[in-house]
Image (cartoon, rainbow, N blue to C red):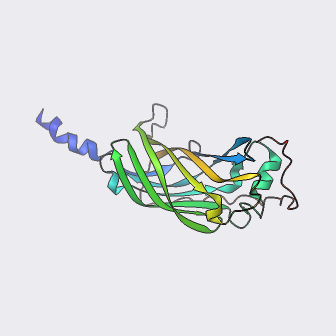
Amino acid sequence: MACVLLALPLAAQSQGGTYRLDPVHTRVVFAISHAGFSHALGTVSGSTGTLVFDPDDWSSASISVSVPLGRLDLGDAEWNRAASARNLLDVQAWPVATFVSHRVEARDPTHASVCGTLTLHGVGRDTCLAVTFNQLQRLSLPPFHRVAGFSATATLHRSDFGIRAWPTVIGDEVRLRIEAEAILDRSAGAPSPEPAVPAAVPPAPTGAAPAMGNPA
């Protein structure tokens, strides 16, 4: 019994460590008004990054994430090209958005505010995410990685990042939802993998917004 009790603190410590985002099970979802008719929904897959996390000590947590904007998907090829074009996201010039935390404030064991610098379209802004810690345990399927899972939300304004085209068609407020899984990295000193640079995106016509009949 004494041996078991002595081992408990070590077991708790083993939950903390450096984790790598799993790009397959990490997805950014965004919603933005389509001329007031509906909220267009889009996703960005393939994010990479590093998370330092101990569920018993949120104050020590930190995260650095790269989001490849070339993988943006609004469910329609024309809208994808338009959103990626020079007068909006300008993916050719700014192919990656990044978020680097600088403050984590726990509200309870499973909820925290994670604040940091979001850099989008070449502009950095302080942004806070409302984060829910879902669970941390060993995956029941091979290769049995230890996985931490999170959900997060945030609201930003595209005009704060210099993205102002088509104000009567595209809303300014952007609501984000992020679902993320991160795998314990036992070689914690290894450098983060570089995000893939997306292929060039053909420019969209600049004379007019896409037809209102296109899917939102």
Residue at x 67% of width, y 66% of height: 162
Residue 92 visible somewhere in the drawing: yes
Give percent across and percent down for residue 89: 71, 60
Of the pair 82 and 19, the residue shown nearer to us:
82
In front here: 7 or 31?
31
Q: Is residue 200 left or right of residue 149?
A: right
The quarter holding residue 97 reads: bottom right
Is residue 16 in view? no
Front position in the image: 202 or 143: 202
Q: Is residue 30 left or right of residue 21?
A: right
x 56%, y 51%: residue = 155
Rendered view: 140 above or below 190: above
Residue at position x 39%, y 48% from top?
112
Name the spot of residue 128 as percent of width and height, x first: 48, 55
- Residue 138 sits above or below residue 74 on the image: above
Task: For the N terminus, give its image quadrant.
Answer: top left
Examine the image and state in which quarter residue 201 appears. bottom right
